[in-house]
Amino acid sequence: MNQTQNPIYAMENFFYPESIAIIGASSNPNKPGGLPIGYLLNKGYEGKIYPVNPARESINGLKCYPSVLDIPDKVDLAIVSVVAADVYHTLEECVAKGIRAAVIFSAGFAEVGPEGLALQQRLTELAGKTGLRLAGPNCVGLLNANNGVMATFAPVADLPPVEPKVLGFVTQSGTFGTLIYNDCLYKGVGFSYFVSVGNEADLEFADFLEYMIHDPGTKLVGGYMEGAKDTVKLRRVAEEALRKEKPVLIMKAGSTAAGSRAAASHTGSLAGSDSIYNAFFKQTGMIRINLHTEVIHFAPLFQMGKPPKGRNVAIVSGSGGRGVTLSDCCETLGLNVVPLRQETRDRLESILPAFASTQNPVDLTAAVMTRPELLLESLKIVSDDPDVDIILTGMNFQGFDSSHPLIREFIDFYYHIQNNTDKFMLVSYFVQPGSEMDSGGRELLQAGMHLVFDWHENIKAVSQLATYYETLQKRKQDKYRVQAPGVKKPDLSGLLKPGETLSESAAKAVLEKYGIPVTREAMATSASEAVSQAKTIGYPVVLKVDSPDILHKTEAGSVKLNLKNDDEVRAAYHEVISNARKYKPDARINGVSVQEMLPEGTEVIVGVTRDPAFGPVIMFGLGGIFVEVLKDVSFRVAPLSPGDASDMIEEIKGFAVLKGVRGKPPVDIEAIADVILKISALVTDYRDSIEELDINPLIVYPRGIKAADALLVVRK
Amino acid sequence: MNQTQNPIYAMENFFYPESIAIIGASSNPNKPGGLPIGYLLNKGYEGKIYPVNPARESINGLKCYPSVLDIPDKVDLAIVSVVAADVYHTLEECVAKGIRAAVIFSAGFAEVGPEGLALQQRLTELAGKTGLRLAGPNCVGLLNANNGVMATFAPVADLPPVEPKVLGFVTQSGTFGTLIYNDCLYKGVGFSYFVSVGNEADLEFADFLEYMIHDPGTKLVGGYMEGAKDTVKLRRVAEEALRKEKPVLIMKAGSTAAGSRAAASHTGSLAGSDSIYNAFFKQTGMIRINLHTEVIHFAPLFQMGKPPKGRNVAIVSGSGGRGVTLSDCCETLGLNVVPLRQETRDRLESILPAFASTQNPVDLTAAVMTRPELLLESLKIVSDDPDVDIILTGMNFQGFDSSHPLIREFIDFYYHIQNNTDKFMLVSYFVQPGSEMDSGGRELLQAGMHLVFDWHENIKAVSQLATYYETLQKRKQDKYRVQAPGVKKPDLSGLLKPGETLSESAAKAVLEKYGIPVTREAMATSASEAVSQAKTIGYPVVLKVDSPDILHKTEAGSVKLNLKNDDEVRAAYHEVISNARKYKPDARINGVSVQEMLPEGTEVIVGVTRDPAFGPVIMFGLGGIFVEVLKDVSFRVAPLSPGDASDMIEEIKGFAVLKGVRGKPPVDIEAIADVILKISALVTDYRDSIEELDINPLIVYPRGIKAADALLVVRK
């Protein structure tokens, strides 16, 4: 891969340019062509700035050039803020000038309809042809907080920089992304990079994500996304992020039908089904968030640099009511408020008053107001309990001077927990509404303690952090490695005819090529042939019409079950044929399929649908009511790892049925996973051929599994 | 009811006392006995204040008395802050002094164990005997913000009073309640009353709620609750609140197992099952909240005084991304982002640029920055759409001076919508993080506009408001009236023997008394009797052993189904008896029940459990997997209205099954509701006799229903 093609190299021109040209520069400091000049001058950019505007001599004291071609020196980055119609020509000049990166603010492209789309496609072609990489068009630009590169006209708030600069952020909405940027910065999250990707004519969301993940200073990345352009690339980048242990928090909009419609209209993105996005997030270990404020709470906890070793929480509080609500909050958000060990409770009882509670949550009661040392003593005891992973506690040292010895002791204890134990501790601090933090509190902050002011949000973040570290551990296991495509790809030529719906027997033939067990069966074209095949297969048998034109065989009256002897088979043969003819006079009938009658088992379904954004997606569910009424199904995007297959089986609500209910033994869950992985191999090998596939029912037994029926639609 | 007994009258002494004695008064302004004196002096209380402390001459310039009996004038309210051991005697003196109301701060009662509980029970008895009404003990007290009655030592923040004073609040946790009080006040919610109920030795949560609901100035009430003491009273008060159209928002803690355990330990309250609390909230129309901040957002919307007429939302925004996320937020929280009418879209298209979106959400794009008038013009068009109930929009008039004509026009439009249309409109205003609101924004606030700064919280509040008004409408229907107990209470004497588990036939006899259809059946004590009864009932039949000692008849091998002739019945009779003897040699066997074999139908379950807090609770669910694996059941607290019965049927996830799936016709839902209501009548008539009841299965058909099996356990 040469440097022109690899976005990682091209990005250096976006984020570390030594010189920037602003084409369409404006002397109005509030216009898109004027704002970046002000920002570059005022936010510490040390490179050269070249305004380009044939109608001006100078802007903000900077010499102005009629065209980029007139700039005497090398230009690394062009900011393009001209009308849509002029963008192509402007970019051609950039290419001529040897510029390698351009940020295009201009609107009037894909977002305005077919004409704009055509204009945009020319930009994409130009980029592909010349190696000039583009951000935008229709974006608010990008910035690098490390060096004052402000290639943006976003109304960024005039806030002091926040250290450390750890968060990279990519947004598919310029305006909304800017709101997020300002709010995060205001609430103390330090950005490294911020990028608005606009219409993604060339570089896209995942490209910028990839750059940030490789940047040593960027410790975690966030994003606002309405729909991924290239989900295969995004998946690759997400896996790279896991390897580099950089959490990716994405606010994926369009989680509801209305939101998804709106997203499609907003960016013209292929929004894809939201439940498939959910599956994709699980599969790739990215953290899906609902509100950008989740980043604000997650970032500082992650920066503490110490994972919670589990989900077991102990709460130590001076208010019973607070303890109760924190317990609810923890359990609701996926943490466990565990019983403390008897030894812990005994030790607590020896120091606390009789009316305090030594169960978890530990309630010190108002006694802590008169004897504040009880808090620290209790925390020390609780921190010795090996069953506890996370300690949540609150300080209520109101009116304590910063010189109070307890403040110092508390800080020492905090750092002891942090540095010498495997416990994760969070401390809330109460500030009376409307008043300033007292000197005791300020002392804690100055000592670098992370104080919590909103438990609900922070408990959610702790749970997300626990999930993230669990994912990291999980993904180190072999079973989460996706198998490379099989060296021996079965030959399906002749079976997969474009646009055809395969008959049941043909569909099963495809499954057999991939080693999926199917019912023993044979085709008969006469009643006597059916009888002789039934004898070979063994009674009882099933007869079904075999026709690519009859999908609903039962509805057509063309399925006869549990036929026990020759006479029944003979009669059934004629009935199946005549019902099929009545149902659809012009149907092509290959014959009648004689199949073994499977013993009773548990019916499950494995299917494949084609999602516009993700391509082949594998679906799993229990048969009957579970799918039809409860929609209790799980998805994963192909290709799947063995771990993905197990996860999607365990994830359905009806999983308990598979483990055995009402005295039934558990079914062969590995056999289900095996079928899922074989289907994953099939749709990966023949990615462009499978439009739809359904094994329904797939009958699973305590040992073994068999496909009783199958449907396969080949793509046109 | 005399005035001493009716808490509403007694409350006047708590909230409108002309004189207050503080018994255990302290000269230390930070102690429980000192704080209320400071508050009373500084927060506008105009009545008389009498500190009582034998060791002091005066406190804060007020004359101090050795005992209440020494106070020369009438005392309306006593604040008691003495050690637990002295409380009883102190209250006796209060009675002697003719005091009618006491707030007891003192701790050391039920919360510390059996000894404290005994002490507390004496207070309860004293209250009952003398008519002295008590708040507490172990509470932080109460306050009336209307007249500066601060009978509390809670650390209330020194914040200016907020008008209008509309919120009454009751809390079962003093410390946590105070946090809520301070935070609500700081965020602009004006309180009328605030009460910490402590251990509820006499007056309880529901009593104070009742008082507040009857107070004209209190427009809505909130509460923090861990467990209701008297759920019957609370239900009556909740119904009164609905009649008076005062919303009740309760943060019910203990929603998880851990929280519930903690609540039980904290207040010793019978927490009750959380899913039953959920049902109770639905049934009584109270709004269950998870965080107190929900009150802060609900209160101002409710005070706008205009209900949203439905749940259909239109969003008009200048940011596509914001529109998408608002759409998601609305749909997730129960509002519908509906398609706009074609006429509306045509009109929008005529004024908006081509790249704007006229579907819902309406995206004005950045065009609104240069042509701000587009916002108002679009809103006018959208407000004409009859399909829209709620309009959400945002102002982005940054840098607009308050004198800008658009500000004025916007205010006029807002009041036009508010006063002359049936639309509900919410406006968000963007304030750059870290900066002050600009003069345009201040102008809007001064004009009395309710501006929204957090969409997520406010959309939730709009949805709650819509639910509240829907509940109000629903509850005006006759079908939500609980029927008075039947005049003809069936006589079950002889059937309900305390402590007994009834045999199936006895249980069915009870159901029949209430008119619930049960399988035709007769008892046989010999094989030939069984045959003759089978002939009378008609083949096929079922045989089941009838024994109060064998609950699991199938497991015992003592159920034989689908017997088609005399021989099969004869053989089955002997088998049923011998299996029962093998299963449980000492079982009392009444005989064998010969029953009609019911045709296939849909199996449902109606059951009754006894909840420690709520008494008899009725449960409904679909049979089989739905109950056993998915726990898909609904609850209502007896007695039920017909509306409650329909609601609980419709509420289960499997309701679609009852409406008919896979080509099956719908079942007789009215017949299910009828059975539920009859069971409600049974457990209301015999409230103290029914420990447990299960009709499982209850088989329902497209027309009709029949109880196939029943179990009834009588209370001891």
Image (cartoon, coloured by chain):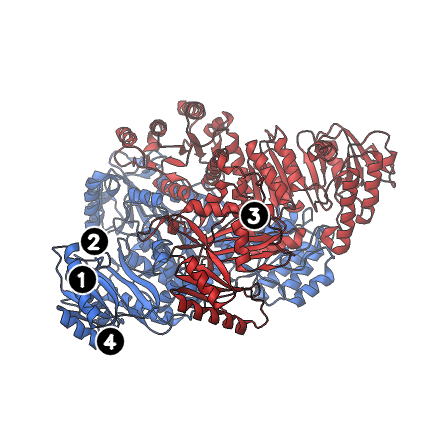
Chain colours: A blue, B red
Marks 1 and 4 close (CB-CB < 8 Å): no
Number of numbered discs present?
A: 4
Between disc 1 and disc 4, whose residue precedes? Answer: 4
Badge 4 is on which residue?
Answer: A538
Question: Please, is residue B189 above or below residue A620 in the view?
Answer: above
Mark 2 to mark 3 CA distance (whole Å): 79 Å
Mark 1 to mark 2 CA distance (whole Å): 62 Å
Mark 1: secondary structure: helix
Q: Is residue B103 visible?
A: yes
Mark 3 to mark 1 CA distance (whole Å): 55 Å
Between disc 2 and disc 4, whose residue precedes? Answer: 2
> Which quadrant holds residue A537?
bottom left
Between disc 1 and disc 2, whose residue precedes? Answer: 2
Q: Do tags 3 and 1 sit on the same chain?
A: no
| Amino acid type, label 4 | Gly
| Amino acid type, label 2 | Gly
Mark 3 to mark 4 CA distance (whole Å): 57 Å
Badge 3 is on which residue?
Answer: B682
| Amino acid type, label 1 | Glu
Nearest to viewer (mark 2 / mark 3): 3
| Chain name for mark 3 | B
Badge 1 is on which residue?
Answer: A575
Q: Callout 3: few (<14), some (14-19), or many (20+) C-alpha neighbours within 10 Å? A: many
Residue toward you, A427 or B45? B45
